[in-house]
Image (cartoon, rainbow, N blue to C red):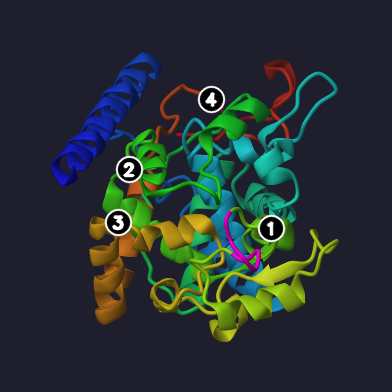
Amino acid sequence: MMASKMYTRMLIVVVATLVFASLGDAYGYSGNHAGLRENYYSRNCPKAVSKISGLIKYYTKEDKSLPAALIRLHFHDCFVNGCDGSVLLDSTPTNLAEKDALPNKFSLRGFEIIDKVKEAIEEICPGVVSCSDILSLAARESISFKGGPRWRVPLGRRDSLSSIAEAANISLPIPTMNYDELVENFANVGLNERDMVILSGAHTLGEAHCAVVMPRLYNFPGSPDGVDPSLGRKYAETPKRKCPPGAELTLIPMAPSFGGQRFDGNYYRNIVSKQALFGSDNALSQDKDGRAIVSNSITSPKTFFREFGLSMEEMGRIAPLTGSQGEIRRKCSAVNPPAKYHRKSYEH
């Protein structure tokens, strides 16, 4: 049975990787994503990275919950057709955009911060820095300011010309997925099992709506008291107090430690102590390989930080638009008007 399960998981990863590679070939993505490099703006907008960093630091001090919002934005952007800024586009009268898809509509925020940063960058380097690059940098800077790791952010992404809600509905992981479903979901975008467990550590930050948690607190199938048996009974009383019936839109911290406001490895301690808020978080402890990664992240925080940075870098490389693909948006929430209305561009 164990060998069969391992073979099935390996097959899922191999098939998904082949599909991902085929899509990359079809859309001009290369395995090494030629065109992305850390110093991409060193010549045409040398102050871009420091300017973005300074602004994110300022806004993070103003709103301590912002880092969780920005890393979630980055994640939800990259998992839907790649890191192309499509999640930032507004819906139009004829198209429902990703930000208004069911998994995003009531949970994503921080759009106005990216818009403000973009406006500031446009003042010094019009038409040069993409919204997708700004979002990638904003995620790193905000996590760093919360005590988390820094990682390499190769730059040079371009912005997509479209955003479709249905793509988000079918691409994003959901809080009820089991371990193998999570592995498959991450493999679909070229990330492996370890990336999945490590990137889940971002749940140490932020809040969730009670609606996502309540199915584990009330009327859980087969449970005598209605509570998911994988939740610690003592711990379950806390979310039940914060999430009484009818409080679906109330927010609850993702992690008990520090109210979900500090980046650390306590997320993994919460998993082994049955204090994981999402069923998908608890799923990490239900698999031998997952438990090993969770255990290592607990015993070696430095290793977790290092691996989180590496996995974030990998995620940031998912199917970028480069070269002549897409565009450099002037405004992150809308595609550029027809070319005849463009200002002079100073792109690479």
Q: Please, is residue 275 above or below residue 134 in the view?
A: below
Res 191 label:
2
Which callout, 3 or 1, points at the residue further toward the start of the chain? 1
Q: Which residue is mark 1?
A: 219
Disc 3 + disc 2, Cβ < 8 Å: no
Q: Amino acid at mark 1?
A: Asn
Which amino acid does the dot numbered 2 rest on? Leu
The amino acid type of the residue labelled 4 equals: Gly
* Residue at 74% from the left image edge and 23% from the top image edge: 337
Question: In front here: 102 or 158?
Answer: 102
> In the image, residue 306 lies at what x, y percent?
28, 68
Is there a contact, CB below 8 Å, between mark 3 and mark 1?
A: no
Residue behind mark 3: 287
CA distance for labels 4 and 1:
47 Å
Please, what is the three-letter code of the amino acid marked with disc 3?
Asp
* Crowd rating for badge 4 (residues with CA inside 10 Å; few <14, some 14–19, many 20+): some
Q: Which mark is residue 326?
A: 4
| Figure disc tally | 4
The residue segment tinted magenta is 222-227
Residue 231 position, x and y percent, is 53, 70
